[in-house]
Amino acid sequence: MSAGNLQVDESGRLRHFLSISGLNRQLLTDILDTAESFSGVTDQTVKKVPLLRGKTIVNLFFEASTRTRTTFELAAKRLSADVLNINITQSSAIKGETLLDTLRNLEAMHVDMFVVRHADSGAAHFIASKVSPHISIINAGDGWHSHPTQALLDVFTIRRVKGPDFGRLRVAIVGDILHSRVARSQIHALNLLNTGEVRIVAPKTLIPTHAETLGVHVYHDLRAGIRDVDVIMMLRLQRERMQGAFIPSEHEYFELFGLTEKKLAGARPDVTVMHPGPINRGVEMDSEVADGARSVILEQVTHGIAVRMAVMSMAMRRKQGAPE
Amino acid sequence: MNTINDIATIIDAMAGQLATLLEGTGRKDPAMVGIHTGGVWIAGLLHARLGISEPLGSLDISFYRDDFTRIGMNPVVKPSQLPFGIDDRHIILVDDVLHTGRTIRAALNELFDYGRPASIMLAALIERDGRELPIEANVVGRHIELRDDEHIKLTGPEPLALKILNTA
């Protein structure tokens, strides 16, 4: 609840972008529409617009990431902002004072926005609650909690391929739901857009205990889980977050939950296959599927830039009481 | 003078002036671009009357406004569409009302991010006082004197109508 209050101002406009759960459907749709407009910028000879000229955006990454950081950086540059990349490798819990010290130092450099990735759930919210009022925070992934721009680019991609009526769509999210911040954000976004049916498909050990309360149908069998679906959203097996025996072996996981052309035959003929990347080929899916005609994995990467441009530009505007 | 009813007549006259201007300057095979939203409506009519072969282009200048940090993003930004190459092209830019000139400044900047046109001329249905930048139209449908607290607005597209509103 506090997330919603924190990320939207008194007139309902975006102030920070921390999670999908604090948004309403109108604001989510506004973001997707704005992203649609930004996707045309790449058609220009000069592939940038002057919207955030003179603004400084800091990519504050406490956790390694190439794709997300790169697309945030490119999005900021296409908005004509100046970008600073700071990688702080630190895996322990939020060290209150240390993190705040880092923030205060960066604030003293007169930056306008932080894009934050952190291994701890709630880190972006914490930072948003502590920064000066003129600074906006964008969550680029926090622990197991959320990865809202990934979910945005996913629903943006679905809207591009299947049209704006999510009510007639059946969507299956397949893989490591338990460790996935992407899955949590995807479920929120799909439900906010009134998706006809959302399924999660995974072995029992990779599904959170309260899964049904998220408004999804749970399947433990891939063939049944993807039967007649319009969209399959594969998740990456979070090998680095797994301690112990969540799955017997990657080989066995692939046998049961890996997506192959053969298993895909049970889905709708026009099914769309998605993956947030990077793919573990031969673990979550066959290369034949990943590189096949039904895969939109590279389109997702392209759309990630437009969606991040939308979020950054909508959150970045003069805040009440801030100097002009 | 609260409404202007003869928009079709005004546009006929503008089309005639544009044709004369194009011929006089030897600018062949021009392309036309309207500025969202009203400018696109007017451009559509001029485009048909002039028989321009290239499809009509449209610009949404929201990403190029100079007041973004003050008022924020317009919630409904329509994608700009220029279905032809800009390079070495003679462009006719069309807007409904020429007032401060700031919209035209933004449109010119956006056009140059698509390429380097051979020339740009400006046509505006209505011209009013209050220019804040050194920008003038080549072809004007009607010049209107308005008080500072008055505001003229084109509604449409079917039917097109001009209304003078008091913002005081």
Image (cartoon, coloured by chain):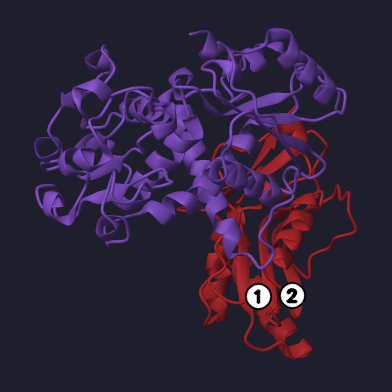
> What crowding class fits label 2: few (fewer than 14 Cα within 10 Å), some (14-19), or many (20 or more)?
some
Give the camera-side residue of A27 and A242. Answer: A242
Q: Position of residue B130 (x, y in %)?
A: 86, 47
Left or right: where A59 falls relative to B46: right
The amino acid type of the residue labelled 1 equals: Ile
The amino acid type of the residue labelled 2 equals: Arg
Left or right: where B128 falls relative to A168: right
Picture disc at residue A141: none
Residue lying at 53% horizontally and 71% vertically, measured from the top left: B83
Chain at tag 1: B
State which quarter of the image contains the N terminus of chain B.
top right
Residue lying at 54% horizontally and 50% vertically, measured from the top left: A37
Image hue for chain A: purple
State which quarter of the image contains the C terminus of chain B.
top right
Which residue is identified by label 1?
Answer: B86
Image hue for chain B: red
Which residue is identified by label 2?
Answer: B116
